[in-house]
Amino acid sequence: MKMKVLLSAIVFTLYTVSYAQNMKMIDTSVPKKDKKEAVVVEYDSLTNIRPYKDASYYKQFVGQSILFYPRNPNSSESLPKYYANFLTSNEQVVAIDTIWRKKRSNPKPKDYKLNQITSKRYKPQLVKDGYVTLCASFHDILEQGYRIFPFEIYRATNQSMEKHDGIFTPYNEIEGRTFKILDIELSDAGVEKNTIFALQSEEGDTLYWYAKRGEYDGFNYTSQHYPVIVLGFMDKMKQLYLNKDIYIKNIHPINKYKCMEIAYSGSEDTYMVPSFVLKNDSADLIMPLCESPSLFSYKVSIFDNQKRMTQMYFYNLDVVEADVYEETMERERLAKEELLMKEKLAQEEAKKLASIKRQQRTKELYKKYGKATADLILKGQVCIGMTKAMVLESWGHPSGGINKTTGAWGTHEQWVYGMGQYLYFENGKLTTIQN
């Protein structure tokens, strides 16, 4: 009876996992980590985590929980379904490979050997012809003679992607799941310069995420984004804006929006990122809280550049809450009223001074030329018999100049004004007015 049970188990194993013996097995061991005291740094909850070279930058995120972005449920089947850079400390049994020691017509139990296939991948799974990528890494890696590429989206260039056999982590064990950061270490081991995140799953499993370290181009890290959001950052955004009225200064005319909810948005072939849904009477806006890298690397997809140029992200908006905006507008209104009042007072003062000057001039002209002539001058009029001084008081100097002729009869002058107006003087007296 015992012999039959053992033979049945062997036959069952042959049918279920016999193909594993012939697969290309790619695996990586996790180095032992020395125990060290954790340095506690207060987290700035107004920022999300990004690739960066400085080790001190990452200390603030230790103890925080992160969420790996989910992918669009309508994503293409040709997108990667497995990750190569999530490891654990403890080996797990992936499958049992049955090896025939000796083949004969009537096999006996001693003719078979059961060989366990183990791996330090997180949630290891045997994969045959699967699209594999490195989560948040850019360069390819070489493991035991097999090269794995974090491809950009080759379909856009009409190229075909390679598939791989091996032991990898299924995407649904990572994407859309929350992990606590236990520690972060910058490693210079090997060709790759990694940022190693020690994470704890909600089930209590410990895993190591080997991510690419940030590359500084001399100006910034703008194109490099991990596919995660720190939950503390998202909670802070909710606290500041969710279910509140806000004004957005970047969008003209400036309108009031209500921040209704946080939803996940993204195109068919990208990660879905947390986004605010903003509504008002005339429009609904989807504003991503953060940028998402390609499913194939830690950089924003090179084929999405044109879209990114027109996409507005919430962190780039000039946003204020409604009450703050209204207070600001009230201060600006009061300041504008004060300015208008000052301008009004200045105008009234100017009018007052002009009136005083007119009165002084009138008094002087009355005294100098008499009332009749002074009234004509004040009205800007001239008449025959006026002296040159009187004309100058009324019309000012001729814009076209003076033509002067002197003879035995005396001195003749033509004063040329604009618009075809001429005045003629004989011996200093106005004798002719030509319009």
Image (cartoon, helix red, strand yellow):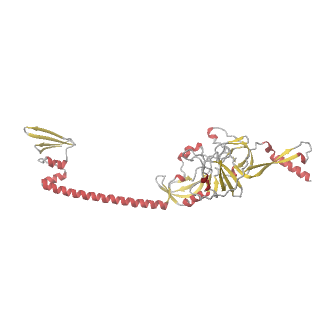
Residue positioned 90% across, 47% down in the render = 110
> How many numbered callouts?
0
Q: Is residue 160 left or right of 412 when viewed as pictured?
A: right
Can see residue 304? yes
User: Which image quarter holds the C terminus?
Assistant: top left
Q: Quadrant of residue 366?
A: bottom left
- Residue 305 in the image, given as x and y percentages of width and height: 56, 44
Given residues 294 and 62, the one toward you in this image is 62
Residue positioned 91% across, 53% down in the render = 2
Can see residue 122? no
Q: Is residue 213 above or below residue 341?
A: above
Q: Quadrant of residue 154?
A: top right
Given residues 101 and 61, the one toward you in this image is 61
Q: Is residue 226 left or right of 117 when viewed as pictured?
A: left
Residue positioned 24% across, 56% down in the render = 354
- Residue 135 in the image, given as x and y percentages of width and height: 66, 48
Q: Is residue 326 left or right of 52 when viewed as pictured?
A: left
- Residue 358 in the image, given as x and y percentages of width and height: 21, 56
Extreme left residue here? 408
- Residue 264 in the image, given as x and y percentages of width and height: 61, 53
